[in-house]
Image: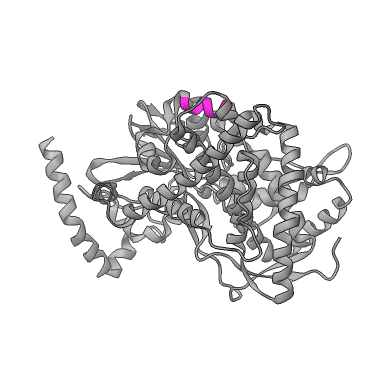
Amino acid sequence: MLNLEFSTSLLFWLLPLLLFFIKSNSIFTNFCSSKSGKLPRSYPLIGSYLAFYANRKRHIQWTSDVVRDSPTSTFILDRPLGSRSVLTANPSNVQHLLKTHFHQYQKGDIFRRTLSDFLGNGIFNADGETWKFQRQVSSHEFNTKSLRKFVEHVVDVELSDRLLPILSAAAKNRTVLDLQDVLQRFAFDNICKIAFGYDPAYLLPSLPPAKFAEAFENAVRISSERFNSFLPLIWKTKRFFNIGSEKQLRIAVNEVREFAKQIIKEKKQELTVKAELDSVDILSRFLISGHSDENFVTDIVISFILAGRDTTSAALTWFFWLVSGNPDVEDKLVREIGEKSDSPVYDEVKDMVYTHASLSESMRLYPPVPIDSKEATEDDVWPDGTVVKKGMRVTYHPYAMGRVEKLWGSDWADFRPERWLENEEVTGKVKFVGRDAYSYPVFQAGPRICLGKEMAFLQMKRVVAGVLRRYRVLPAAEEGVEPVLITHLTSKMKGGFPVIMKERDEYF
């Protein structure tokens, strides 16, 4: 214990000197980077901290390079004071930890502590019976009847009454829109309506600032930065003294929780007035189930906002950017949309095969959740021979997996929806052919596979049809300038996605 305390103290005082040395020596910084294809070096006491720091502004890309450069697509990263974590892009390992040995890999103490201030015991931060209960109650809202209602009465209304008028005004006035912000607003209204029966009306023509939305964004960003900290002692110290980013996080979380509690309060009043609701949303189901712990229900509300607001909006943002640079794909999308334009809304989006393939392809390159971590609850050996010790943090890497040549071929860098399609032998019609969930874990896999997968696809396809039917989405940045990927739990574009909407000469 004494040696550990001494090492911790020594490292705490040495880090400022190390950071100064790194900043003042660009050659050494480049040496520590894995951009050149070299795996990061590890040193006594500090592990691979130097390489980590050199790549701190491209954490996802760096870790992707590391696992792809490894012969087994798996790498053990040395952290300070002898701590180690495992990164993998190997489908056999992913299946091992998400399915066949699911019980051995939980969210764990590290994950829960890191996100507990923000997500509490919500479904994305829970294990065991707490997780099972939330999943069981939530699952009732993902049947065909609920999905049809979601598309026809929530998504389509928000699209027609709010999103398209904003895009139309922008096209008419040649106004530059931040499409990332607009899509987050759209997704936020949708998830609140379907999950809580509440309309926050965040997507309005004036795109008004919202105190809650800003607080939510800050909470997501700072919580994510905790994960990217190579030395958790730093953020924990700031949290203890309530200073810096941790003070900002506490203020943001308080704002978010007050918003969630107000939604719960209004729903309880609604249930009191009318015990038998015509339409039972997810929040009503949890309240009806007998859970009266306000903090627990608040955690549930926040988790669903995170899932519904950030993932689909992230996927759509990257999708529209990729389509804008691939006119042949856009032409095929528009052709399919035209062919389905006379179908009822639900049937239209359900049968959009090429659009489904295009969305799958864009999420291969830019998965909404680019990495996900678990914790080993006991010693284990993975299929590729990697030895995992109890308590180790293990991370599977969807972003890297979408870039592995062995999985996707030499053209993995190309945006090519056709890789998801094939012709049926009997009818000759084109059909979608999905990949197994362990080679493409964008929606997780195994017992924790995303309940909202089909709902997300339906929502995204309806948006794609509604937007591309009438408009071309043109990036406002200079030609050749690519957006910068940043990760705040989900994939985002740094600084937003400024676009110009151009109305099509003919639309249907």
135 drawn magenta: yes
Visible in this render: residue 124? no
Residue 429: name its quadrant: top right
Residue 308, above or below 496: above
Considering the whole magenta stretch, tell me its main secondary structure: helix
Give the magenta part as a residue range.
130-136
Residue that appears at 82% across and 54% down: 336
| Rendered location of residue 64, percent (x, y) | 46, 51
Please tell me whether residue 309 is drawn above or below residue 57 in the rendered image: above
Q: In screen coordinates, is 372 left or right of 393?
A: right
Asked whether residue 114 is drawn in magenta, I would say no
**Residue 426 as seen in the image, left or right of residue 364:** right
- Asked if residue 76 is positioned above or below residue 59 in the image, the reply reads above
Whether residue 347 is visible here, answered yes or no, is yes
What residue appears at the point 67 percent right and 33 percent down from the top-left corner? 142
**Closer to us: 349 or 151:** 151
Q: Nearer the viewer, residue 335 or 314?
A: 314
Relative image position of residue 360 (x, y in whole percent): 66, 48
What residue is rendered at 34% in x and 53% in y? Answer: 40
Q: Quadrant of the N terminus?
A: top left
| Displayed quadrant of residue 268 | top right
Give the residue furthest to the front: 273
User: Where residue 356 sits in the image (x, y, percent)?
Assistant: 72, 47
What's the coloring here? one colour
Give x and y (percent) for residue 445: 56, 34
Classify residue 465 by image quadrant. bottom right
Dividing the image into 4 quarters, which one contains the C terminus?
bottom right
Q: Is residue 361 left or right of residue 135?
A: right
Marks counted in the figure total: 0
